[in-house]
C-alpha cells in the first residue's frame, strides 16, 4: 500500500523527518519498503500485514503514528444525514451472511468534471489513478476511512437494488471493459434487469459515471471477506476495494465515509443530497474483555515489566484497561481491532510497542524427549563420503515434465493440479532427468569432466496412494570417465559404508546399454550403466554419460558399524595364471570357479596384466590373474599352495571358453 | 722414472680427466670397459707384473690393486649420480588432474546452521515433501481461504484425498514440525531442514523450489528472551561475532508475537568485510543502504497451534523460527542469482570445494 504524509496531516500534526517516520513505522510493524518526496508531499510504500485491516486507511496509519509520537488524533467527523429517507428505492439483501449492511445515498444534479488539484494529488500520491471528481471522491474517502465506496450513474439503474449471488453464466462487463462469465461464487449488485456491480470488487460498465452523468447513487456496504475473496478469485481480479473487503471492513467508519463523500460531492461536484436507503444493519460489536496476568506476561516475554508500564502502553493504543489486582488487568481492545482476541494478542501488542529489541536475549536450557533423525545423519554421512570419491554434489528441482519422466522411468508419476508451466507438470520419479540437465548444462559450456551426485527424493503413485523415497544418484562424463570408474566409485562407497554382501548382476536395464544391477540378497538396491544413445540423442547430450541410482533406505539398512577382524600373521603365497577368455564366458564365472576350488585358503584375486595386440585371439580377452593363498592359522607350505593352484588350473581349463596360456 | 711409473701416471690422470665428462650410463659403460675391461691399460699393466723383479712384483701388485679399487669406487659413485640425473623429469608438466569432490553450497550452509543449533540442544527431524492441507495450513492456524494464506501459494497434487484434506507439495517445512509436535511429547527442541515448493515465477531471487530450516522449542519455561538468545547466537556463530540483530514486529498466523529478523549488513556495516571492496564508495548494493538485511521470521508459537497438536497451551510455551537457506547462502557468499544453485555449473560448484 502507499500513503502520503500530507494526507496523514488531515488527522495529525507530524513534525518529524520522513526518514525518522519511516523507521518508527517499520519498528512498529508497518514495514516501510520505500519512501520519497513528491512535490511538497512524502509518499511511503508500506507492507500491511493481513491481520491489520485497520492500517489500510489513512486514519489507521495516522492512529499508529500518533501512538508512536505520543500524540492524539484530531478527527473532524463529517455530519451524518441519516434522517432523510429515500422512498423511491428498496435495498433487497438475499443473504445477510454475504452482506450485513448496505447504504445507498442519492445525490442529484452533479457536474462531472476533472478533480481539483488537491483531490487528484491525494489519490495519486496513494497510487490511485485520478478519473474524475466523483470517482476520485469515492477513492479519497475509501483511502481516508478504509471503507470502499462505489458511485453509480443513478439514471442507468432500473428499479431496486438487489444484493444476490450471480446466476450461472450470467455475464458482466466491468468498468475495466473486460467481460466475465459469472457463477454462484460471485456476489453481485443488480437492479431489476441487470448486474450493475461485482459486489465489493468492481462496478459495471453499464452504470459507470461519465461526463454526462447528472445523478449519483453512492454505495457503501459491509460485504463478507470470504465471499469477496471467492468472488474476485473466480473472476480473476484484484482491486483496492476487494483488497480491503477481503481483509475485513468495519462498519464503524462507514457512515463517516459516506458523509464525507456526500459533503464533497455537494461541494466539488455541486450536487444535492436527496436521501438514503439502507438494508441490513450496522452491527458494531464491542470486543470482549480479556483478563491478563502480569506475571504470565513476564513469563511469556522473559523480562519483568511494571504494572504502570503495561497500563500506559495499552491505554495509549486506545485499549480500555482496568486493574483488578496487582497482578491482573482486564483489557478491551478498541472496536477497530479485530485481531485482539486472546491473552497472547495483548502480549503481542504490549511487546510490539515496548520494543522487541529492548528485551534482553538469553540462552535457554533445551530439553528433548526425542532424538536426531537417523536418516538425516545417514544422508550427511553420504555427503561426506562421496566428495572423497571425487564426486561433486548437485541440487536439481523436483518437478519435471510427465512426458520426459515416462521416457526415463516406468514408475507412475504424480501430476500437479496447478503447474506453473505445462511442461513441468509432475513430480520426478527418477533423479536421472536432473542429472542429464546438469551434465548437459556443463557440456554446453565446455566443461567436460563431470562427476556428480545428488541426494533427493523421488515420488510416485503406488497402491497406498503415493510414495516418497530418498535416492542417491551419480552421473559421470568426460575424459577418463567410463563404466568401470563409476563401478569403482560404488565399490568405494560400499567400502566406506562397510556394506559387504553386494553383487553386481549383469542384467539389462531399459534406457541403458551395459547396465549392472546392484543386488543385496534378493533385493535390487540400484543399478549403474551407460546411458543409451537413443536417450542421449533425445536429450541432446553430446557425450557418453554413466549413471547410477541407489536406494538410500536400503543403503542405510545395510550399512554396518565397523568391527575389527584380525589380520593373518602368516605369509601369503601368490601364483599367476594367464587366461584367454571367450566372450561367451564372464569374468564372474572365472571368479566363481576360483572361489569354489580355493575356498578358505583364498585370500584374494587380482588382475595384474591385460594383453592387447595382434596375437590376442578374436572375441577373446587375455589377462593374467594373480591368486593369493593364505591360511589363518599356520604358515602355508608352498606344496599346499601348489596342490590347490593345480586344482584351480584344472577346473578353469575344463570350462568351455577358458584357455589357459 | 721407469716405464711402468710413466704408464701408471698417465693412466691415473686420463681416468680423472675422462671421468669429468661422463653424463650418461652409456658413456659410463664405455669408460668402465676402457679402464677395467680385459684389454684396458690397467690390465696391460697387470700383465707386466710377471716380468718384474720379486721386490717390484710386491710393490706394483699392491699399487695396481689400489688403483683398480679406486677406479671401481669412482665409477660406482659416478653411476649412481648419472642414474639420479637420468630420472629427473620435467616437473612442471601438469598433474593428472585433481580428483576433488565437493558438497553443494546449500547442503554445506544448511548443515552448518543445523550443527550450530544441534550444539544448543536441538535435534534434527526431516519430514516428507508431500503433505496435506491440514498439516500445511489448518494446524498452523492458517485458514484455507484467507489473505494470510496468499504468501503460501501451493502446488496441489493429483493424489486421492484422505481425511486431512488435499495433497500438496509443502510450501514450508512447518508441517514436518507439526508432525513431531503431534507424535512426541514436550519438552522438545527440533529443527527441520528441507526442500519446499511455491508456484513463484523463476527470476534472480525466486525459485519454485527452495530450502528452509525451521526450528522450534517447547517447554514450560520457554520465553521470548530465549528466542532472541538462540537467534543471536546463531547469526553470530554463522556470520561473525560482530553481527547485530534487529527484530521487527510482523504477523504470522502461527506465532504471536511474531517478528521479522534483520542482521546488520554484512557488507557495509562490518568494518573488515572481505566482500566490501566490491561496493566500495557507492551505495551498498546488498542492503540498499538500509544497513539491515532481513534473514528470518520468528515468534512465540500461537496457542492455537499447540492446541492443534494436543499440547496444553496453559502449561507449555514455545518459540519457533524459520529461514530460507538460499537467501542466507546468497548473503554469506555474495551470490546474486538464485538460479545458480540449481544449474550446477562446475565452475560454480568448484568454488565451494
Ligand atoms: Zn549494506
Image (tube, grey):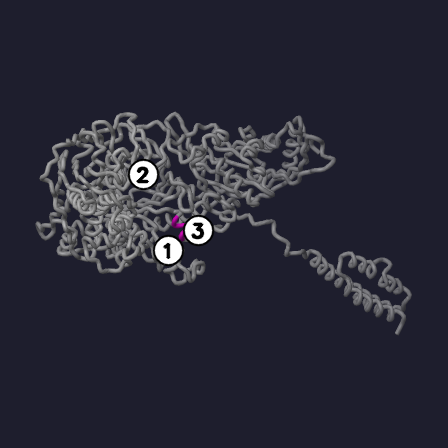
In the depicted structure, whether residue B75 falls above or below residue A236: below
In the depicted structure, whether residue B30 falls above or below residue B216: below
Neighbour tally class for label 1: few under 14, some 14-19, many 20 plus, Cα within 10 Å:
few
- Along the line of sight, which residue is nearer the eye, A171 or A319? A171
Q: For ligand 1, which image quadrant applies?
A: bottom left
Q: Does B328 appear in magenta?
A: yes
Q: Does B256 sit left or right of A444 as displayed? A: left
Secondary structure predominantly adopted by residues drawn in magenta: helix
Q: Chain of mark 2?
A: B
Check disc 2 and report the residue beneath it. B175
Q: Does B36 sit left or right of A70 as displayed? A: right
Q: Name which quarter of the figure residue A588 lies in.
A: top right
Check disc 3 and report the residue beneath it. B335
Q: Does B319 appear in magenta?
A: no
How far, Cα to Cα, is label 1 from label 3?
16 Å
Number of numbered markers: 3
Check disc 1 and report the residue beneath it. B288
Tags 3 and 2 on a common chain: yes
Q: Does A501 sit left or right of A38 as displayed? A: right
Q: Secondary structure at mark 3?
A: loop
Q: Earlier in the sequence, mark 3 or mark 2?
A: 2
Q: Quadrant of the C terminus of chain A?
A: top right
Amino acid at each position: 500500500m502507499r500513503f502520503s504524509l500530507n494526507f496523514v496531516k488531515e488527522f495529525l500534526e507530524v513534525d518529524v523527518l520522513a526518514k525518522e517516520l519511516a523507521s518508527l513505522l517499520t519498528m512498529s510493524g508497518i514495514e516501510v519498503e520505500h519512501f520519497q518526496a513528491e512535490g511538497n508531499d512524502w509518499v511511503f510504500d508500506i507492507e500491511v500485514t493481513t491481520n491489520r485491516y485497520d492500517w489500510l486507511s489513512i486514519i489507521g496509519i495516522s492512529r499508529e503514528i500518533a501512538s508512536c509520537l505520543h500524540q492524539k488524533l484530531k478527527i473532524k467527523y463529517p455530519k451524518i444525514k441519516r434522517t432523510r429517507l429515500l422512498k423511491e428505492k428498496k435495498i433487497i439483501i438475499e443473504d445477510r451472511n454475504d452482506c450485513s449492511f448496505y447504504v445507498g445515498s442519492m445525490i442529484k444534479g452533479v457536474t462531472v468534471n476533472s478533480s481539483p488539484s488537491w483531490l487528484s494529488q491525494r489519490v495519486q500520491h496513494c497510487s490511485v489513478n485520478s478519473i474524475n471528481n466523483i470517482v476520485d471522491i469515492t477513492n479519497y474517502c475509501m483511502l481516508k476511512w478504509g471503507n470502499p465506496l462505489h458511485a453509480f450513474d443513478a439514471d442507468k439503474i432500473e428499479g431496486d437494488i438487489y444484493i444476490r449471488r450471480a446466476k450461472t453464466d450470467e455475464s458482466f462487463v466491468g468498468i475495466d471493459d473486460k467481460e466475465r462469465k459469472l457463477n454462484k461464487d460471485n456476489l453481485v449488485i443488480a437492479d431489476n434487469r441487470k448486474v450493475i456491480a461485482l459486489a465489493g470488487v468492481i462496478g459495471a460498465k453499464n452504470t459507470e459515471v461519465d461526463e454526462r452523468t447528472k445523478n449519483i447513487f453512492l454505495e457503501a456496504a459491509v460485504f463478507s471477506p470470504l465471499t469477496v475473496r471467492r468472488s474476485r478469485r473466480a473472476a480473476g481480479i484484484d482491486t483496492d476495494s476487494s483488497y480491503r473487503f477481503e481483509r475485513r471492513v468495519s462498519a464503524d467508519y462507514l457512515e463517516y465515509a459516506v458523509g464525507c463523500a456526500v459533503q464533497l460531492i455537494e461541494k466539488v461536484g455541486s450536487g444535492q443530497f436527496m436521501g438514503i436507503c439502507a438494508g441490513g444493519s450496522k452491527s458494531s460489536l464491542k470486543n470482549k474483555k480479556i483478563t491478563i496476568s502480569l506475571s504470565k506476561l513476564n513469563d511469556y516475554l522473559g523480562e519483568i515489566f511494571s504494572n504502570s508500564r503495561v497500563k500506559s502502553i495499552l491505554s495509549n493504543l486506545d485499549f480500555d484497561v482496568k486493574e483488578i489486582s496487582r497482578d491482573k488487568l482486564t483489557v478491551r481492545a478498541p472496536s477497530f481491532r479485530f485481531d485482539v482476541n486472546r491473552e497472547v494478542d495483548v502480549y503481542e501488542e504490549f511487546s510490539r510497542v515496548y520494543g522487541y529489541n529492548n528485551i534482553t536475549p538469553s540462552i535457554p536450557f533445551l530439553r528433548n524427549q526425542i532424538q536426531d533423525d537417523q536418516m538425516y545423519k545417514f544422508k550427511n554421512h553420504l555427503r561426506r563420503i562421496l566428495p572423497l570419491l571425487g564426486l561433486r554434489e548437485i541440487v536439481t528441482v523436483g518437478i519435471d515434465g510427465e512426458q520426459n519422466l515416462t521416457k526415463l522411468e516406468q514408475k507412475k508419476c504424480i501430476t500437479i493440479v496447478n503447474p506453473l508451466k505445462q511442461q513441468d507438470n509432475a513430480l520426478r520419479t527418477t533423479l536421472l532427468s536432473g542429472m542429464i540437465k546438469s551434465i548437459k548444462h556443463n557440456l554446453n559450456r565446455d566443461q567436460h569432466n563431470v562427476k556428480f551426485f545428488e541426494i533427493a527424493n523421488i515420488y510416485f503413485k503406488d497402491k497406498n496412494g503415493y510414495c516418497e523415497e530418498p535416492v542417491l544418484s551419480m552421473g559421470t562424463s568426460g575424459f577418463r570417465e567410463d563404466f568401470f570408474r563409476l563401478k569403482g566409485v560404488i565399490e568405494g562407497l560400499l567400502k566406506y559404508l562397510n556394506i559387504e554382501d553386494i553383487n553386481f548382476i549383469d542384467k539389462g536395464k531399459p534406457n541403458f546399454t551395459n547396465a549392472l544391477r546392484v543386488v543385496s540378497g534378493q533385493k535390487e538396491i540400484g543399478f549403474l550403466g551407460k546411458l543409451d544413445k537413443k536417450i542421449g540423442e533425445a536429450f541432446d547430450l553430446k557425450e557418453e554419460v554413466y549413471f547410477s541410482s541407489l536406494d538410500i533406505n536400503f543403503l542405510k539398512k545395510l550399512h554396518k558399524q565397523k568391527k575389527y577382524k584380525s589380520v593373518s600373521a602368516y605369509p601369503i603365497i601368490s601364483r599367476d595364471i594367464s587366461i584367454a577368455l571367450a566372450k561367451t564366458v564372464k569374468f564372474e564365472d572365472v571368479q566363481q570357479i576360483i572361489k569354489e576350488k580355493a575356498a578358505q585358503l583364498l585370500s584374494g584375486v587380482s588382475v595384474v596384466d591385460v594383453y592387447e595386440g595382434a596375437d590376442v585371439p578374436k572375441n577373446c580377452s587375455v589377462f593374467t590373474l594373480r591368486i593369493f593363498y593364505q591360511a589363518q592359522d599356520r604358515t602355508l607350505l608352498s606344496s599346499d599352495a601348489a596342490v590347490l593352484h593345480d586344482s584351480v588350473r584344472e577346473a578353469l581349463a575344463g570350462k568351455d571358453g577358458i584357455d589357459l596360456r | 722414472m721407469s716405464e711402468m711409473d710413466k704408464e701408471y701416471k698417465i693412466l691415473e690422470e686420463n681416468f680423472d680427466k675422462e671421468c669429468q665428462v661422463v653424463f650418461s650410463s652409456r658413456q659410463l659403460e664405455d669408460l668402465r670397459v676402457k679402464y677395467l675391461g680385459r684389454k684396458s691399460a690397467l690390465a696391460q699393466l697387470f700383465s707386466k707384473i710377471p716380468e718384474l723383479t720379486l721386490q717390484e712384483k710386491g710393490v706394483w701388485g699392491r699399487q695396481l690393486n689400489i688403483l683398480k679399487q679406486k677406479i671401481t669406487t669412482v665409477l660406482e659413485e659416478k653411476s649412481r649420480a648419472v642414474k639420479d640425473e637420468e630420472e629427473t623429469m620435467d616437473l612442471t608438466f601438469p598433474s593428472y588432474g585433481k580428483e576433488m569432490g565437493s558438497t553443494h553450497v546449500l547442503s554445506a550452509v544448511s548443515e552448518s546452521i543445523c550443527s550450530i543449533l544441534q550444539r544448543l540442544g536441538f535435534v534434527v527431524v526431516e519430514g516428507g515433501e508431500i503433505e496435506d492441507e491440514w498439516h500445511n495450513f489448518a494446524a498452523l492456524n492458517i485458514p484455507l481461504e484467507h489473505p494470510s494464506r496468499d504468501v503460501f501459494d501451493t502446488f496441489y497434487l493429483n493424489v486421492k484425498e484422505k481425511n486431512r484434506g488435499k495433497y500438496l507439495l509443502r510450501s514450508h517445512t512447518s508441517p514436518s514440525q507439526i508432525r513431531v509436535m503431534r507424535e512426541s511429547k514436550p519438552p522438545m527442541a527440533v529443527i527441520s531442514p528441507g526442500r519446499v515448493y511455491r508456484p513463484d515465477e523463476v527470476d534472480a531471487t525466486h525459485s519454485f523450489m527452495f530450502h528452509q530450516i525451521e526450528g522450534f522449542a517447547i517447554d514450560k519455561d520457554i520465553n521470548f528472551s530465549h528466542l532472541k538468545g538462540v537467534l543471536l547466537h546463531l547469526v553470530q556463530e554463522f556470520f561473525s561475532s560482530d553481527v547485530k540483530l534487529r527484530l521487527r514486529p510482523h504477523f504470522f498466523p502461527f506465532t504471536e508475537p511474531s517478528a521479522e529478523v534483520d542482521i546488520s549488513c554484512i557488507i557495509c556495516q562490518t568494518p573488515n568485510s572481505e566482500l566490501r571492496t566490491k561496493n566500495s564508495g557507492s551505495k551498498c548494493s546488498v542492503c540498499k543502504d538500509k544497513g539491515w538485511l532481513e534473514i528470518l521470521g520468528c515468534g512465540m508459537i500461537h496457542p492455537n497451534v499447540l492446541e492443534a497438536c494436543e499440547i496444553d497451551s496453559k502449561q507449555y510455551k514455545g518459540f519457533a523460527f524459520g529461514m530460507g537457506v538460499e537467501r542466507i547462502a546468497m548473503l554469506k557468499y555474495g551470490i546474486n542469482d538464485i538460479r545458480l544453485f540449481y544449474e550446477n555449473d562446475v565452475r560454480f560448484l568448484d568454488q565451494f570445494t
